[in-house]
Image: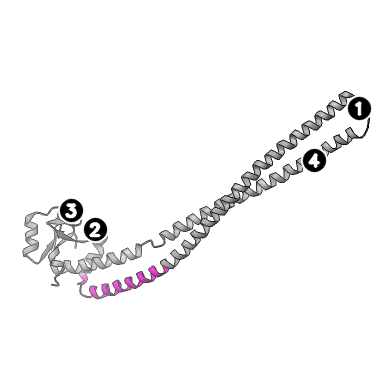
Amino acid sequence: MRIDKIMELKKRDSLLLYKLQLLDLKIFQIESRDIEKNLNEIQFEIKKIEEEVKKLSNDLKEKELEIKNIEGEIADLNKRGDKLKETLSSGKKLSEKELNSIQSEIDKIQNLIKKNEDIIIEIDEFIEKTKEKIKKQREVLDSKKKEGLNEDIKIKEEKKKLEIDKDEYIKKREELIKKIPEELLNFYQININRFGRKIISVVIEDRCSECGMILPYGLISILKNSDKSINCENCGRFLILKKDIDIDF
Ligand SMILES: [Zn+2]
């Protein structure tokens, strides 16, 4: 059985296929539902924050090391300065030129020490800010992790519920297909995916509800006054009147 040209089904057949299509749609919706989407997003955010905390911690270590190095440098400078001061106070006779040179060296050293101390103050400020950032990020991380755990619980409950629903739809489907002639069922299974899982379209206010086409009067008249269900001229789906859905033929 092909569906390319206009063909007919009995209304009874269309109604059976319509019921089957509704169950299949529900099963498909359950199977294709991405219930872990939120959790995946939370986990992605957690990973991002963890990376950020790691980066900040590395920055912190680097800066702490930098301070140690500068402190070492300051200690060396102090030693050099002390030696020069010792020379000055040793009572050794020095020319004015030598005195000036030593004094100028001491001044230079003290300037360097001051510069290094200023750098340490700057780095200390950076370290404090970084520690504060890490603390805040860890707080966000904790709350995200809690959120993730809650979401996990929610997903498990949702999965259970969906499984129950799905089992119910599958049972109903099994009951329903017993009523559908084999040829009709084959026809449905071969063609259903061509029509976006909707092989039967309900006529609502003289339109095919699936493609939106206004149907000619003659066609509506056949649907109303016979037991036939014919194709929509536009999309090819089988048409069934809304009022006929509630009736079991
Ligand atoms: Zn249509």
Q: Which residue is mark 2?
A: 195
**Residue shown at 81%/32% (left/top)?**
106
Q: Position of residue 173 (x, y in %)?
A: 26, 72
Q: Amino acid at mark 3?
A: Gly
Tell me: is circle 1 under 8 Å from ligand 1.
no
Say whether disc 2 or disc 3 marks the residue closer to the N-terminus: 2
Using the image as rendered, state which of residue 191 and residue 66 is in the foreground: 66
Picture quarter with ligand 1: bottom left
Q: Nearer the viewer, mark 1 or mark 2?
A: 1
Q: Amino acid at mark 2?
A: Phe
Q: Name the image colouring.
A: one colour
Q: Secondary structure at mark 3?
A: loop
What quarter of the picture does the C terminus occupy? Answer: bottom left
- Around disc 2, counting alpha carbons within 10 Å, would you say few (fewer than 14), some (14 to 19), or many (20 or more)? some
Say whether disc 3 or disc 1 marks the residue closer to the N-terminus: 1
Q: Is residue 248 left or right of residue 22?
A: left
Quote the CA–CA distance across marks 4 and 3: 87 Å
Say whether disc 1 or disc 2 marks the residue closer to the N-terminus: 1
Using the image as rendered, state which of residue 54 and residue 23 is in the foreground: 54
Say whether disc 1 or disc 4 marks the residue closer to the N-terminus: 4
Q: Secondary structure at mark 2?
A: helix
Quote the CA–CA distance across marks 4 and 2: 84 Å
Q: Which residue is mark 3?
A: 212
Q: Is residue 196 left or right of residue 108?
A: left
